[in-house]
Image: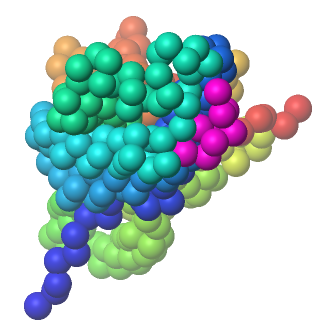
Amino acid sequence: MERATSPHPLIGHQVALLTITGFWAFYVLVVTLRAALLDYNAQAILFERRLMVALAGVLVTWILYVGLRMADRRSLGFRVGCTFIGAIPCAVILASANFYIFYLYDPISLFKDPSIGRSVEDLREKLGLSFWQEIADISITHYFFLIAWGAFYVAIGYAREVREAERKTSRFAQAAQDAELRSLRYQVNPHFLFNTLNSLSSLVMIGKPKEAEAMIQNLSNFYRTSLSSDPLEDVTLAEEVELQRLYLEIESVRHPKRLRVKIDIPDAVMGQHVPALILQPLVENAIKYGVSRTTRPVELTISAKSEGDVLILSVVDDGEAVDPDHVGGNGIGLANVRDRLEARYKSAARLDTQEIPGGGFVAMLTLPLNRRIAP
């Protein structure tokens, strides 16, 4: 049985220690500047004691950090509540340490005016403050300081949690897109195989064993080539055209006198990458509607060219006129092409179809160029 691993902490010890130290260094700086402005006596001694308070503050804040760390991965409201509640005892502990360091441990005179008193203890007696009132007063000051650090800690942790969620969402979205591309890509092969087996059956039934054998050999070569590639990886246009040559050789066995093939693609764009078998449904469509429905010779042309930053691939036949549904591209094959383009390129690619006046059909793919065309 696999052991479950707990999620890693949102903030590590090193980052926590750096932020805590930074906060208390800021505290020492601010209080020292305040004491300098008020012109207290014994500045050097007071500075040493502030450092002692700051050290105590680091230790107490570290205790608060350990407590807040246990609340990691809980709701934001829960973590904020823990910060406000956990800072209370920490502030009291820190106030007690502050009181001892400044008021009980070797009291010193802070004021130059002797009428005010020798020490803070004298001033406290003049003001009539009890021990607990003094602790409460100091606790409030430190409480808000601890709250400030706690809020900073929770904010950093929450921001990291949001980033992790975004990365996870991105991975899930990519996985979903990959699954969709695989599904759409694998739809092509069964559709093609079904049509080819029908053709093979027809050849056997009319007594053409040599043609059937040639079709089986071409079919084997086609699937060996097409299935060896990763469905998520693109192929070069040269490889895609070679696959279509294999397929058209299969179809030429069925239509030896009617199918004429022309491939008009300049060498400059043969290195462009396109989705594997993206031309297959378009070529099948031309065979099904342009060649199979007529008794006269039909020319099927596969062409490509680059225009600006796009690659345009066209499959054109000069067969019989087609019905409006075919022109609209509502068939399974053309729908598959549109879905694959949407999954792979979003709005950067499209499939356009058009009937040719007098007979024939054009299916045109527009894809983004993926490398510079050689001059």
Query: Magenta segment, principal secondary structure?
Result: helix
**Quarter of the figure with the N terminus:** bottom left
Toward the viewer: 348 or 55?
Answer: 55
Residue 290 to residue 347: above or below: below
Query: Which residue in the rendered view is the most extreme toward the bottom?
Result: 1
| Residue at point 21%, 66% (across, down) | 197
Q: Position of residue 278 (x, y in %)?
A: 42, 44
Quarter of the view holding residue 212: bottom left
Q: Is residue 238 left or right of residue 208?
A: right
The reply to whether residue 52 is in sight is: yes
Residue 357 to residue 261: above or below: above
Residue 37 to residue 301: above or below: above
Q: Position of residue 316 (x, y in %)?
A: 47, 29
- Colour scheme in use: rainbow
Query: Which residue in the rendered view is the most extreme toward the top?
Result: 357
Residues in magenta, as a range? 41-49
Q: Position of residue 70 (x, y in %)?
A: 20, 58
Q: Is residue 190 left or right of residue 65?
A: left
Quarter of the view holding residue 359: top left
| Residue at point 49%, 48% (across, down) | 106
Quarter of the view holding residue 173: top left
Toward the viewer: 286 or 342?
Answer: 342
Residue 136 to residue 117: above or below: below
- Magenta stretch encompasses residue 46: yes
Toward the viewer: 285 or 271?
Answer: 271
The reply to whether residue 364 is in sight is: no
Q: Is residue 69 left or right of residue 51?
A: left
**Quarter of the figure with the C terminus:** top right
Toward the viewer: 117 or 255?
Answer: 117
